[in-house]
Image (tube, helix red, strand yellow):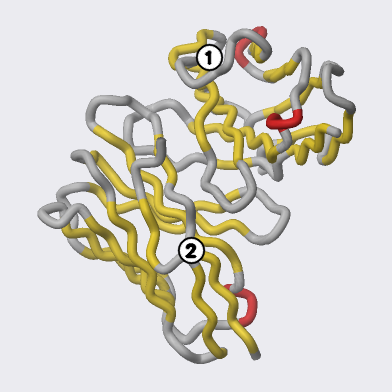
């Protein structure tokens, strides 16, 4: 089966510009996650969706970050305006959403560089 | 903040040797998972161990969990150059359904 798909793979923008990342989870997976991974660190959760509902967005910087998961499938994460400190890898993951002890399946990530 | 801390931060070994890395965490967990990340790639799930389990095997991988010490270890036996990657532990806590908290990872380099 196809894995988690993310695009673009790389993005270079100037500060104050907007940027958007797209994620298509594994078919049938109800739970979708967006993580940010800084260099040399582990992923940190930004937002988690159960179907189309954001059930945990406590770590999402809401002044500049927004996300949506229309129809409970694909998701978009947006940053507007981007700051230098937003340079990181943005990872999308999905899981079946059938229990607490679940494996998460990660996409390849979008590497963002803000100049 | 990150729940888990891996030790060592970096590990360099030769092919055929065993690699051991440890993970310590702070709060009670429901499960602990290990993931691998090759350079420039996403994370790949390796193994999940539940809080009521003490040891688990998968191929050349062996994971132990000591909830009294709040620690876990990952052993890779007979390492190969393809095992070169960063390894992360991630904890699922009882008070946060479905949420994983990752450590900073152990970078493993296996030289031929």
- Residue B64 percent across, percent down from the top left: 25, 65
Residue occupying the point 58% across, 82% down: B80
Q: Which residue is mark 2?
A: B106
For residue A82, above or below residue B33: above
Q: Is residue A49 left or right of residue B77?
A: right
Give the quarter of the figure containing the C terminus of chain A.
top right
Residue occupying the point 59% across, 76% down: B109
Q: Is residue B97 left or right of residue A59?
A: left
- Residue B105 percent across, percent down from the top left: 48, 57
- Residue A33 percent across, percent down from the top left: 55, 27
Residue A51 is labelled as 1
Hey, which quadrant is residue A7 in on the image?
A: top right
Hey, which quadrant is residue B62 in on the image?
A: bottom left
Residue occupying the point 56% across, 53% down: B44
Give the quarter of the figure containing the N terminus of chain A.
top right
Secondary structure of residue under mark 2: strand
* Badge 1 density bin: few <14, some 14–19, many ≥20, Cα 10 Å: some
Q: Is residue B64 left or right of residue B83?
A: left
Residue under mark 1: which chain is it in? A
Per the model, the C-alpha gap separating discs 2 and 1 is 33 Å
Total numbered labels placed on residues in the image: 2
For residue A48, above or below residue B85: above
Q: Is residue A81 among what the camera can see? A: yes
Q: Is residue A2 among what the camera can see? A: no
Task: In this rendered view, identify the residue nearer to me: B28 or A17.
Answer: A17
Secondary structure of residue under mark 1: loop
């Amino acid at each position: 089966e196809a894995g988690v798909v993310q695009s673009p793979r790389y993005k270079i923008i100037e500060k104050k510009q907007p940027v958007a990342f797209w994620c298509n989870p594994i078919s049938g997976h109800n739970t979708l996650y967006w993580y940010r991974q800084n260099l040399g660190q582990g992923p940190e959760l930004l937002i988690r969706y159960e179907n189309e509902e954001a059930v945990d967005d406590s770590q999402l910087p809401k002044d500049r970050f927004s996300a949506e998961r229309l129809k409970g499938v694909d998701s978009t994460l947006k940053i507007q305006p981007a700051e230098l400190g937003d340079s990181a890898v943005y990872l999308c993951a999905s899981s079946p959403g059938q229990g607490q002890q679940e494996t998460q399946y990660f996409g390849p990530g979008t590497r963002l560089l803000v100049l | 903040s990150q729940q888990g801390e891996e030790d060592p931060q970096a590990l360099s070994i030769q092919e055929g040797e065993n690699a051991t890395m440890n993970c310590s965490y702070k709060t009670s967990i429901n499960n602990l998972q290990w993931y691998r990340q090759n350079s420039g790639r996403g994370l790949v799930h390796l193994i999940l161990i539940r809080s009521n389990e003490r040891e688990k095997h998968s191929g050349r991988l062996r994971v132990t969990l000591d909830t009294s010490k709040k620690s876990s270890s990952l052993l890779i036996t007979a390492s190969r150059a393809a095992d070169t990657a960063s390894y992360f532990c991630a904890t699922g806590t009882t008070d946060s359904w479905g949420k994983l908290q990752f450590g900073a990872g152990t970078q493993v380099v296996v030289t031929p």
